[in-house]
Image (cartoon, helix red, strand yellow):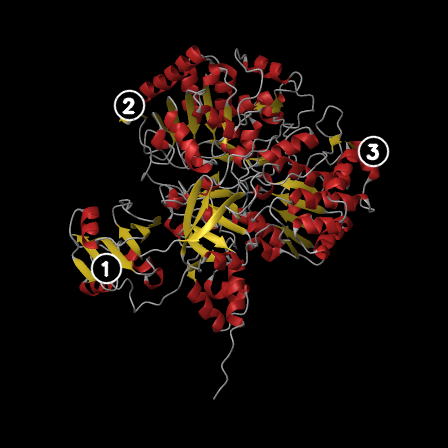
Amino acid sequence: MTQPPTTGCQSTCPYCGVGCGVVMPDGGEATLGDQSHPANFGRLCVKGSSLHETLGTQGRLMHPEIAGEQVSWPSAIDAVAARIAESAREYGPESVAFYLSGQLLTEDYYLANKLAKGFIGTPHVDTNSRLCMSSAAAAHKRAFGADIVPGCYEDLELADLLVITGSNAAWNHPILYQRMKAAGRKGRRVVVIDPRRTATTELADLFLPLKPGTDAVLFNGLLMAISQSKALDLAYLEAHCSGYDGALAAAQESAPTVADVARICELPEADVARFYDWFIETPRSLTFFSQGINQSASGTDKGNAIINCHLATGRVGKPGASPFSITGQPNAMGGREVGGLANTLAAHMEYDKPGDRERVIQFWEAPSLPSGPGLKAVDLFEAVHNGKIKVLWVMATNPAVSLPDNARVREALDRCETVIVSDCVRDTDTTAYADILLPARGWGEKDGTVTNSERRISRQRAFQKSSTEAMPDWWILNEVGRALGYKQAFAFTSAADVFREHAALSAYENDGRRPFNLAGLRHISDESYDQLKPVQWPVLADPVLGTARLFGDGRYATPDRRARFIAIRPQAPAQQPGPEYPLVVNTGRIRDQWHTMTRTGRAPRLWNHLPEPFIEINPRDAMRAGVTDGQLAQLEGPSGRFTGRARVTDAVRQGDVFVPIHWNRQFSGEALASDLIAPVTDPFSGQPESKHGCARLKALHSAWEGRLLLAEDKPPHREMAYWAKAVFPACASYWLAGEKPLNWPDYFAGLLGEKPQLVMHDPARGGYRAATFAGGRLKAVLIIEPSSQTLPDPAWLASCFAMETLDGATRRKLLAGRDAELPDTGAIVCSCFQVGEITIRQAVEAGAKDTESLGLALKCGTNCGSCIPELKQLISAVQVQPVEADG
């Protein structure tokens, strides 16, 4: 459902790599989709449409701080410059490192790389994009000669065969998923490849739940099948490619027959053959891949195994026919453009390409550009741990949560002599280690550009003034550069200034062999920059004309203009299950949260769908471990533990479990997915193997479980075996559990500094309920029960915290935990319109037979569509219930 036209500030959503356009009306009380933006045409997912709920100053980093003390900006800039200069002088430039983020704007990213690599002289500049798309970037370079996504979003609609692999697009890129779904037509087929059955499989004509880690075998087998069919484009290979024979020989070794592929991938042979037949007979085939392919110790090889199949059929850069890597972050692509990865230089230039390093030195007049690549993320933090890196500047990311072997990363941060953190949030797991805190502007206050997954540059426009002392990241970097003495190189006065230099460098001595080229934008005026419409690079001319597809003519970015086949010899995941840790741990995102929740965690609406950390477990594995659905459970791996609510489901394969990546120490006691992941990386890309940990499972036998709601948030960590926090409009809500009974009157009084005013205590049964007030307003509620099954849903209790005064009738209901006069709507299924499971079931029972009729009755499923697979499951569940016979 598109939004009505409106006037307001046009900007870009700061979440996933789709790069949706948004409109922020005056007043900031809503977030609307931009109907004119070619990425989303007005549609927004629930995260995007909740953006206005994440604004405000609560929890913001308000002022620069040094050692916890507020200081002025000049003092903070001088301190940062002094620490960097001192470390570079005493230990060398390589003792300084930067860790950046796909949340930065391109202009911020550009100056970070110019300052660090060009003038400080450290090669150690990497980014959290290393964790999500660096294997795809490496695969592109090996095959195409440059990090290029050849296709565009329109190809998702034009493809007659859409292969979705390693991507739960329905939840992680929901607007693209809706475009794919809307393009359904007679004869069009969709194959979904994923070890786990996700919401995306609702779109599938064929679902292949392969064994984790066997993706390259599956695509090597496809290459073998192509080689024996008419789909092999021999004329294309002869004119435009090299290395085919070697790639085919490697495929022959690992996947000689369909039967071999089926056995290794643990798939039905008929399904594998059907997939291969469909690909062979469909010229317009597109393979859409994401983190499930990339986040592997052989992610680059997996990407090249996919690309090999497209090269063998000549299906690259053609309408509806390409390999298509989708990025996870809003500006992961922009960071790749400016050298945000440790092994690259700005403007898609490379350390190891003849002439590139000298070209950057000449353009920047840079005295200190390193001679070779720096350390990639995992190795960078290991160098922090062992003391080789003395000064670490972290910008707009939270590595204390997101990197593998998290305990060692936190230990590294604690050991580092100087940790500088630029962020808009005061308290994150990473800011706790900061010696210097720099308040950066947040989304809504920032001005610049981002590039989405189809190479489309869009403007991020500030639509609100900062109510703190926060400054743009590019400004902070510019001022540090000046303080270090590089005033001529850092004389920027606006984001537009930075963008012009970025565009000019892309065009500098570019004879066409570097596809990344913004020549048509290098002289853009401030006014034109402000009014810039979304455009796909390369942009070679003025007026600004973008380029939808690349390599369709068979001319690539390699020295001889030929694409490279890569011989792929599949490697098994580094960690393998065994007697001690028998389960494979898969990790991923959920529908309504983002990264480590520093932004989405502020929006109460986004907590309704999946409010607790959880573990998805196959029924057989759950039975073996003695874990029941809804019970608390623990995963224990070689380097840490994860505690969450068990969700027993056949959506995961036997021997596998799934956990979400979002929870951190601000929102849970022991639910960091990264604690279960070893620091094993791809040898080409440096990307961690985040999809394949190992663990054992056990039930958490709690003596009690509880709900604690607080008007003023106070972490209730004392003697808890489990706690997890969610956010409501007027209070914080905690799930609690413990293995030993507590003295609840003493606990309540100790937490709040006063005795409760309402109490219901049943020591024999193990129940305790209490509430207290400040004036007429509700201050806190605590409900303890022997089991979670008798705990009330916290939604009604949370609504009481918004009341100015609670009347006597409402107070009497508090300890019951619900208002019996109000209908129970059930757990929220549709976050966009807050429609609960019970309401949906009732509508189906009343005659709503499909998702369309549910949408007409309740609106559920009519906005972003992410809940439609769950709606279909509920419809099916209600409709198959047996009807009792009369008499």
Query: For the residues marked 2 and 3, what is the alpha-carbon distance in whole angstroms?
Result: 65 Å
Q: Residue at x 77, y 38 (%)?
A: 248
In space, the residues marked 1 and 2 are separated at their CA atoms by 45 Å
x, y percent for residue 649: 51, 58
Disc 1 is placed on an element classified as strand
Q: Read off the residue under disc 1.
A: 769
Q: In the image, which is nearer the foreground, mark 1 or mark 2?
A: 1
Residue lying furthest bottom = 887
Q: Position of residue 225 (x, y in %)?
A: 78, 47
Label 2–label 3 contact, CB within 8 A: no
| 192 in relation to 640, above or below | below
The mark nearer the N terminus, 2 or 3, is 2
Quick one: SS at disc 2?
loop
N-terminal-most mark, 1 or 2:
2
What's the amino acid at mark 3? Glu
Mark 2: few, some, or many residues within 10 Å (few <14, many ≥20)? some
Decide if residue 192 is on the left or right side of residue 643: right
Residue farthest along the front direction in this orientation? 579
Q: Is residue 619 left or right of residue 310?
A: left
Q: Quadrant of residue 201?
A: bottom right
Q: Nearer the viewer, residue 780 or 349?
A: 780
- Front disc: 2 or 3: 3
Amino acid type of the residue tagged 1 in the rendering: Arg
Q: Which mark is residue 102?
A: none
Judging by the rendered image, the residue that carries numbered circle 2 is 71
- Against 728, residue 123 (above or below) is above
What residue lies at 23% left-to-right and 59% top-to-bottom? 769
Q: Position of residue 546 (x, y in %)?
A: 63, 34
Q: Residues within 10 Å of mark 1 (few under 14, many from 20)?
A: many
Residue at label 3?
238
The three-letter amino acid code for the residue at tag 2 is: Val
